[in-house]
Image (spheres, rainbow, N blue to C red):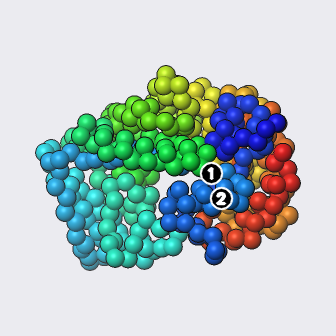
Amino acid sequence: MARLSSRERMLSVLRYEEPDRVPLLLNTFGFQPPPPLGWSSQYEEARTWLSLGVDDWLDIWPPHVFHPDVKVRQWEESRPGDPWPCMVKEYDTPAGVFRQEVYRTDDWVSPEWPTHRDEAPGINLLDDYNVPRYRACPIESEQDLEKLRYLIRPVPDEAISGFQERADVVARQARELGVLLVGGASDGADAASWLCGHEPLLFMAMDRPGLFEEMLDIIHVREKRNVELLLDTPVDLIMRRGYYEGTTFWSPGLYRRYFLPRIRELADLVHQGDRMMGYTMSVGWLPLLDAFVESGIDAQNLLDPIAGGQRIDLARVKSAFNKRVAVIGGLNEPITLHRGSARDIREELFRAVRDLGEGGGLALSVAEAIMPTTPWRSIETLIEAWKEVRD
């Protein structure tokens, strides 16, 4: 078989065709390789990985634009009995003030979370670090949702041209490199968790389902607009985040009630535009295999082969997906790459290729990501082992 470009190889995987070789994607989060390797943009990062023989992709996201009448102010305060200083951010909307209160813990600025900086500590509306640090859930009533509509809203017309210009730049870079172009469209329950925290959100879903569904609908309306905008670009794969939609947090019944219909609607929109849809979930996914097939997604992204310390039967996954859902994943970072031996790494990679690769539908990738603490030697071992078996 003629050697394919990285993009052609990934498209072959997503279509469940047999590629020229099993792709390997080394997605990173805050990781910097040793000199002379290095990068300062996703374009340079992709070029670096391609130079080592592995695959990569470039991504674009539609912008998040508040209503123009929203005024924002932020400060920090300390109350007696509080364990840490508390950052307070108020978004003054035409429906009233939406307020976030987040403790600035000692690890707010950390190498493991590169999006936070010493020089400008503060709250982002949507941020993983908010979730366990909320002093109080910012959404308590329907009135709070009316305020939220000014913060979580479809991309306005006046922002479209700027997004299209940025998308054109990234698309040209993807064509130059010969890599897949991925569009981020949807956060789903991840966004809801960022707004509320996990426990308040779970109680809301069970005790106040109407309020919970209304919040999901506010998020969903924006996400449908994101899909429409991405379909006007050359994007190949449109992705939904679902880190916090797995059964680590939700029962399969609640998943089917709240999330599955919305995911299926997005997948239908994506397919109407003749593109493919991926779904990122690294934990709590095993009881949802049938639901993934029903949802219409084309690929599960960041499938972790280790759950709760136990290895997953990957052959069962292959059988359940039945050539309808491709896998991007199969490799574990915190146990295997971070702490495992060279033998552990090789065995995990060979197992993934053996159980998931036959007949196509597999792109190897690391769940969750290559982290700042991932040993470079483990990555070298992974690449060496992959070269032995990729064909």
Q: Position of residue 389 (x, y in %)?
A: 85, 50
| Residue at (19, 58) in percent of width and height | 72
Secondary element at tag 1: loop
132 vs 172, nearest the viewer = 172
Residue 251 horizontal side relative to residue 60, left or right:
right
Camera-side residue: 79 or 53? 53
Residue name at image x 75 percent, y 37 percent: 19
What residue is at 30 percent from the left and 70 percent from the top?
A: 86
Eyeballing the image, is 29 above or below 256? below
Q: Label 1 sits on what residue type?
A: Asp
Mark 1 or mark 2: name the one nearer the start of the chain.
2
Q: Is residue 243 above or below residue 30?
A: above
Which quadrant holds the C terminus? Answer: top right
Q: Is residue 293 above or below residue 310?
A: above
- Percent from the top left, x then y, of residue 109? 43, 73
Residue 223 falls left or right of residue 329: left
Left or right relative to 273: residue 71: left
Depth order, front residue of 189/173 = 173
Residue beneath label 1, please?
Answer: 56
Residue 192: tell me if it is visible: no
Label 2 crowding class (10 Å Cα cut-off): few <14, some 14-19, many 20+? some
Element assignment for label 2: helix
Residue 14 appears in which quarter of the rendering?
top right
Asked if labels 2 and 1 touch by Cβ distance under 8 angstroms, the answer is yes
Q: Which residue matches tag 2?
A: 49
Q: Residue at x 65, y 35 (%)?
A: 11
Query: As drawn, is 259 to the left or to the right of 91?
Result: right
- Tell me if residue 389 can be seen: yes
